[in-house]
Image (spheres, rainbow, N blue to C red):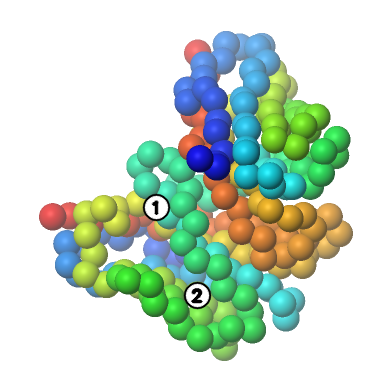
């Protein structure tokens, strides 16, 4: 079955700790995205990557970092610099890059909570 | 100013009622795309429809229909004979040329939470 997987489903972070959220896709999609969703809010773009070894900041990149070493994988690290990390994190992918109108397909999400 | 406005924060209906979710967008581009996604309680966003700016024909898919009107910059979504399984948050999104590398990125509205009661 083709799709996007995210792990873990729930993640707990202690003060001052970096945590990494996993996102894997087997759709052979070029582009991948990370979004943050807060209660009652829409999705806000954190980072996106249009090609391996390249990524761009989205609207709320501060306190986050990413890597794209493989086409299938786009992990997101929430660093200790992110002071309010509690949120629902969604990963998405789309087939092509750089063009408008590409449909994005989403993973099941990771809920990050601060202890 | 928001580029995608979903003015209805929450809507509650009784099963079998029809319900329309509003979406108003703002763009200066002549070529753009509009999307609707459904987010059930499980959290995953499910793609429902994509419409480009040159196709104003309304679309129907089963109980779902979409009304695209460029004159009012709206792309409304109607569920006919709603069911409990339709309960979810629905997001409208815009894809426009934007500037430079952000071309194509989705701009989401804040969503409308639909509750369908039995």
Task: State the image quarter where residue A35 is shown.
Answer: top right
Residue A100's spot in the image, x, y percent? Answer: 72, 65
Q: Is residue A39 visible?
A: no
Which residue position holds label 2?
A: B75
Which residue position holds label 1?
A: B89
Residue at x 17% of width, y 62% of height: B15
- Disc 1 and disc 2 on one polypeptide chain: yes
In this view of the protein, which residue sits in the foreground, B3 or B81? B81
Q: Of marks 1 and 2, which one's residue comes earlier in the chain?
A: 2
Q: Is residue A40 above or below residue B71?
A: above
Per the image, label 2 sits on a secondary structure element best described as strand
Q: Residues within 10 Å of mark 2 (few under 14, many from 20)?
A: many
Q: Is residue A70 above or below residue B107?
A: above
Tell me, yes or no, whether the two marked residues, 1 and 2, touch with CB atoms within 8 Å: no
Residue at x 83% of width, y 62% of height: B99
Subunit ID for the residue under disc 1 = B
Name the side, left or right, on which B16 lies relative to B99: left
Q: Is residue B81 visible?
A: yes
Name the side, left or right, on which A92 lies relative to B115: right
- For marks 1 and 2, give the CA distance: 16 Å
In this view of the protein, which residue sits in the foreground, B41 or A15? B41
């Amino acid at each position: 079955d083709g799709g996007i997987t995210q792990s873990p489903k729930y993640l707990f972070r202690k003060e001052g700790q970096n945590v990494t959220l996993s996102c894997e896709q087997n759709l052979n999609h070029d582009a991948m995205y990370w979004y943050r969703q807060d209660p009652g809010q829409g999705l806000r773009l954190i980072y996106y990557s249009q090609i391996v070894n390249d990524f761009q900041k989205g609207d709320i990149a501060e306190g986050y970092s990413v890597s794209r070493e493989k086409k299938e994988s786009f992990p997101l690290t929430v660093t200790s610099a992110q002071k309010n990390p509690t949120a629902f994190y969604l990963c998405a992918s789309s087939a092509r890059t750089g063009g408008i109108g590409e449909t994005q397909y989403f993973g099941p999400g990771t809920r990050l909570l601060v202890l | 100013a928001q580029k995608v406005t979903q003015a209805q924060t929450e809507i509650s209906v009784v099963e079998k009622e029809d319900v329309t979710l509003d979406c108003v967008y703002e763009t200066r581009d002549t070529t753009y795309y509009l999307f609707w996604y459904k987010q059930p309680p499980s959290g995953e966003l499910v793609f429902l429809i994509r419409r480009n700016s040159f196709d104003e024909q309304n679309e129907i898919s089963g109980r779902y229909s979409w009304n695209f009107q460029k004159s009012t910059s709206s792309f409304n979504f109607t569920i006919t004979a709603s069911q409990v399984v339709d309960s979810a948050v629905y997001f409208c999104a815009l894809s426009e040329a934007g500037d430079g590398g952000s071309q194509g990125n989705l701009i989401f509205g804040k969503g409308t939470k639909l509750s369908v009661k039995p």
